[in-house]
């Protein structure tokens, strides 16, 4: 069987952060180019699809916008596993949401159990830059945190004003894609030959045609 | 949950986005000929997911395959990447229930039915307007996937490559086989009855053919040679096997699916690894498939455990072809059976046969079926589809309710009579004027006739080598 044309890459992206930091707004701005001031808490998770062009390659992002409330965190394993990238979001006007980043990151690594946790791609987004006058976390503080975590890329964004959102996600896709191509060797070979042992063949009870 | 899916498939096709200019608006603008064309505002781009979901609502059914963690692998309408979010949702449904220590099997609304099958590391889901045989369709599709990636590979691939591995890489090029597996449920009574169909042929002719096949295999003496199958029109002509090894009917139906969905076999031979999960689900056999003469609907499939036997199997085929070509008797009967198959005619049962319009007989131990030749009123495509659906419903009922021995249903246009015994199941479609007693008498007469002509419609002996 021929392998056919190379499939469009597909990335599973998880977005995590405290309740109210604007995860859903970021998604909505990025995917639908819309913003609403109304706050509606996410129940469990929302899922969105976005096609993005990275250099000459079309990539589909499957975005898992999770609920920030603690009561949904038991869903973690199913949500986090198999992710290609994790987006951490905090609110620049809310220092608690920044302090909690460590626990979100740890929780993700425990639940997702990625193969190379030290180099798993995270991105940090500081949202609500439109409210910069109320800023509670300095840029420097956020950058220092990112450096301490193996140089996580950091973007200051505003879902409301569509500031930096597009470029942040471009970076996310590019990073995850780079990892995918590093890891592109599929095993085409077929395992060892079946050993014919007549005593083992009739594992299935009945069902065989009387051939 | 169910209402969510119901809406999904019932969204009307042409919901125009707000702000979109309708055709008549445009016409009105054009009509104002002396005015310059004002710029019209383009509608906002509809999110891909919504338009893709719209598209789904037109299908009678849809099948999804995803990784345990929600990554899209296959959707029967194609372009799985446009339905990423919907795949994620299916994954969450299944995982949420698993998280509670239970298993999600199905969700039903009035006119829409979703069935889920969790086969670690995969989730399969079918959403259908019909409710019968949904689980079976998923199980057979899973076997189809196993024929490309053995169970052993499937179980280890995510461990080796990470949970984010894109399984589409390993399944590349096999969508047509998955499509073929699913579409067969809509026309192939062998698939519906989980059995195989035998090409009608006189017993002596069939024996001569299979003896020739065994002779070619024996004289080549190829180490690792395991099974040989001659098939045409998705029906088995003859089989042979290595001593002490059996070919399960489910594996045989995977072979049939492979052959009938590979368009290139027509003039060239095919060599492909295939896992037959009911024979051995951790390794691969190597199949050599070739047509038997130019433009022949008949194919020879040779299966070997040794990947280095391509040349040897080709020689077996050459030898087999030469032998049948040199025997006019074998060749003529074979060609006649393949080009104009003689299905069982109800007239074989004698008196009352005009009341018997159609039947499907299934032998339970051999998993072989026999179908009546088509006759009025079941000639056209639509009538055949109705028969297929009726058979599918009957099997669904027989499998889900224990102990049913007979069913008699009188409809306006026909009578349905079903008899289920330990050794066989018989479904008959009869004239609407047929009484229950008459149906039973005709059924018994039919069984007797089938016994008389057993050698023509069933394979009763498979020679080994």
Image: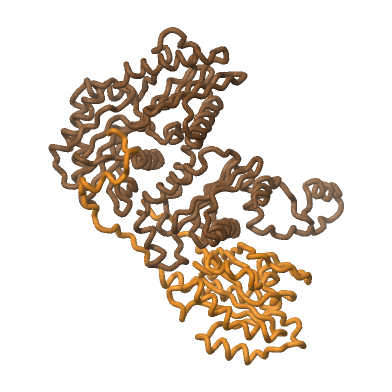
Which residue is pictured at 56% across the width and 82% down the height? Answer: A153
Chain represented in orange: A
Q: Position of residue B416 (x, y in %)?
A: 53, 22
Please name the colour scheme applied to the rendered image.
Answer: by chain
Decide if residue B81 is in sight here.
no
Q: Is residue A118 left or right of residue B318?
A: right
Quarter holding residue B204: top left
Which residue is pictured at 43% across the width and 45% down the height? Answer: B177
Query: In the rendered picture of this protein, how many numbered marks are placed on residues?
Result: 0
Q: Position of residue B248 (x, y in %)?
A: 32, 40
Rendered position, A109 above or below B38: below
Q: Position of residue B429 (x, y in %)?
A: 51, 20
Decide if residue B53 is in sight here.
yes
Which residue is pictured at 62% across the width and 68% down the height? Answer: A72
Out of B353 and B149, give the one closest to the viewer.
Answer: B353
Q: Is residue B327 left or right of residue B158?
A: left
The C terminus of chain B appears in which quarter of the rendering? Answer: top left
Rendered position, A170 above or below B143: below
Q: Is residue A196 left or right of residue B256?
A: left
Chain represented in brown: B
Quarter holding residue B265: top left
Q: Position of residue A56 (x, y in %)?
A: 52, 67
Looking at the image, the residue that sits furthest to the top is B351
Which residue is pictured at 46% across the width and 9% down the height? Answer: B352
Rendered position, B52 above or below B383: below
């Amino acid at each position: 069987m021929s392998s056919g044309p190379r499939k469009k890459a597909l990335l599973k992206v998880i977005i995590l952060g405290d309740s109210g930091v604007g995860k859903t707004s970021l998604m909505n701005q990025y995917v639908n180019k819309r913003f609403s001031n109304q706050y509606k808490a996410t129940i469990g998770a929302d899922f969105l699809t976005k096609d993005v062009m990275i250099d000459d390659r079309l990539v589909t992002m499957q975005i898992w916008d999770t609920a920030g409330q603690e009561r949904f965190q038991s869903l973690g394993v199913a949500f986090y596993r198999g992710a290609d990238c994790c987006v951490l979001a905090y609110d620049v006007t809310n220092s608690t949401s920044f302090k909690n980043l460590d626990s979100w990151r740890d929780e993700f690594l425990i639940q997702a159990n990625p193969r190379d946790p030290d180099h798993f791609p995270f991105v940090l987004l500081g949202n609500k830059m439109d409210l910069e006058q109320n800023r509670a976390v300095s840029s420097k503080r956020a950058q220092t945190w990112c450096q301490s975590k193996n140089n996580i890329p950091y973007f200051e964004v505003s879902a409301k004003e569509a500031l930096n959102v597009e470029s942040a996600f471009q970076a996310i896709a590019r990073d995850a894609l780079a990892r995918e191509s590093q890891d592109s060797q599929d095993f085409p070979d077929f395992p060892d030959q079946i050993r014919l042992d007549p005593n083992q063949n009739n594992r299935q009870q009945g069902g065989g045609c009387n051939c | 949950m169910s209402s969510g899916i119901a809406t999904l498939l019932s969204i009307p096709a042409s919901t125009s986005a707000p702000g979109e200019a309708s055709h008549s608006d445009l016409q009105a603008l054009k009509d104002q000929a002396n005015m310059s064309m004002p710029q019209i505002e383009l509608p906002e781009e509809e999110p891909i997911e919504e338009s893709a979901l719209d598209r789904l609502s037109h299908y009678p059914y849809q099948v999804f395959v995803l990784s345990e963690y929600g990554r899209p692998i296959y959707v029967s309408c194609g372009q799985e990447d446009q339905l990423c979010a919907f795949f994620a949702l299916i994954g969450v449904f299944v995982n949420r229930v698993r998280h509670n220590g239970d298993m999600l099997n199905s969700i039903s609304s009035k006119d829409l039915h979703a069935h889920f099958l969790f086969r670690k590391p995969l989730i399969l889901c079918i959403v259908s307007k019909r409710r019968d045989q949904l689980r079976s369709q998923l199980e057979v599709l899973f076997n189809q996937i196993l024929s490309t990636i053995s169970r052993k590979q499937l179980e280890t691939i995510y461990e080796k490559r990470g949970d984010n591995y894109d399984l589409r890489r390993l399944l590349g090029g096999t969508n047509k086989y998955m499509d073929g597996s699913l579409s067969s449920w809509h026309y192939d009574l062998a698939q519906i009855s989980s059995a195989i169909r035998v090409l009608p042929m006189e017993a002596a002719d069939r024996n001569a053919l299979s003896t020739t096949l065994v002779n070619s295999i024996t004289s080549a003496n190829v180490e690792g040679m395991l099974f040989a199958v001659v098939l045409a029109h998705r029906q088995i002509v003859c089989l042979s096997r290595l001593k002490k090894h059996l070919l399960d009917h489910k594996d045989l139906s995977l072979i049939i699916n492979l052959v009938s969905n590979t368009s290139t076999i027509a003039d060239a031979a095919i060599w492909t690894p295939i896992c037959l999960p009911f024979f051995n689900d951790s390794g691969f056999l190597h199949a050599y498939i070739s047509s038997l003469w130019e433009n022949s609907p008949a194919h020879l499939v040779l299966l070997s455990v040794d990947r280095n036997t391509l040349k040897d199997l080709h020689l077996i085929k050459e030898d087999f072809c030469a032998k049948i070509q040199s025997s006019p008797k074998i060749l003529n009967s074979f060609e006649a059976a393949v080009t104009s198959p003689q299905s069982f005619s109800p007239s074989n049962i004698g008196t009352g046969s005009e009341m018997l319009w159609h039947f499907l007989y299934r032998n339970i131990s051999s998993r072989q079926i026999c179908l009546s030749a088509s006759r009025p009123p079941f000639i056209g495509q639509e009538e055949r589809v109705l028969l297929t659906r009726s058979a599918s419903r009957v099997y669904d009922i027989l499998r889900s309710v224990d102990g049913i021995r007979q069913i008699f249903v009188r409809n306006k246009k026909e009578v349905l009579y079903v008899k289920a015994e330990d050794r066989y199941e018989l479904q008959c479609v009869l004239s609407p004027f047929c009484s229950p007693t008459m149906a039973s008498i005709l059924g018994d007469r039919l069984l007797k006739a089938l016994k008389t002509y057993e050698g023509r419609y069933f394979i009763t002996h498979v020679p080994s080598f």
